[in-house]
Amino acid sequence: MPKSLADPEQLFYLGLKALIRNEEGQILLVQEDPRDNPFDTVSGDYWDFPGGRIQKGETEQQAFDREMKEELGVSNVSKGSLLTAVISNLYSEIEGHKIGRILFVYEVSGNFSNIQLSDEHIAVKWFDPLEAAAWLKVKYPLELTGKIAELD
């Protein structure tokens, strides 16, 4: 029997995120449109790793390739090693129920000199690891942001 959203078990989305570093060791983050993101109510700024959820019927690699193309306009990106998997500090809501987010963060390499930003985002920027960690703490637990800060 299929489970309903009213069941007491926590439901989760599964997402893939890309930790992209340039030759100077900076980390690429995308700024989401504040009208679409209620997460940072103080400044309206919300920065994240590029990436997104795996859609029904997709393999992990298909989802990763789709997200890199959609969000950054880049192809031929190499998904490297898994940095970590974390449960996000943020939840989505469906029909009044909180849905958690399990996020797999991969180290990624490729050519990111000609980024074409999606309409989901309003900016893209390279940050030093400490600054990136500060922006990412809205969504990610200390378990990950601490690792990011140590990349400096």
Image (spheres, rainbow, N blue to C red):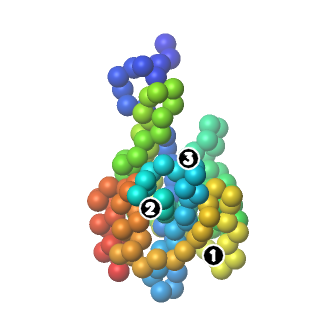
Q: Regarding mark 3 in the picture, which secondary structure is present there?
A: strand
Q: Is residue 85 visible?
A: no
Q: Earlier in the sequence, mark 2 or mark 3?
A: 2
Front residue of 148/127: it is: 127
Front of the two marks 1 and 2: 2
- Residue under pointer 1: 112
Q: How far apart are the alpha carbons under marks 2 and 3?
A: 25 Å
- Residue under pointer 2: 43
Horizontal and vertical percent position of residue 45: 48, 62
Horizontal and vertical percent position of residue 37: 52, 51
- Residue under pointer 3: 53
Q: Can you tell which quarter of the image residue 6 is in?
A: top left
Q: Earlier in the sequence, mark 1 or mark 2?
A: 2
Mark 2 touches mark 3? (CB < 8 Å): no
Q: Earlier in the sequence, mark 3 or mark 1?
A: 3
> How many numbered discs?
3
User: In the image, what residue occupies the spot 44% across and 28% down?
Assistant: 97
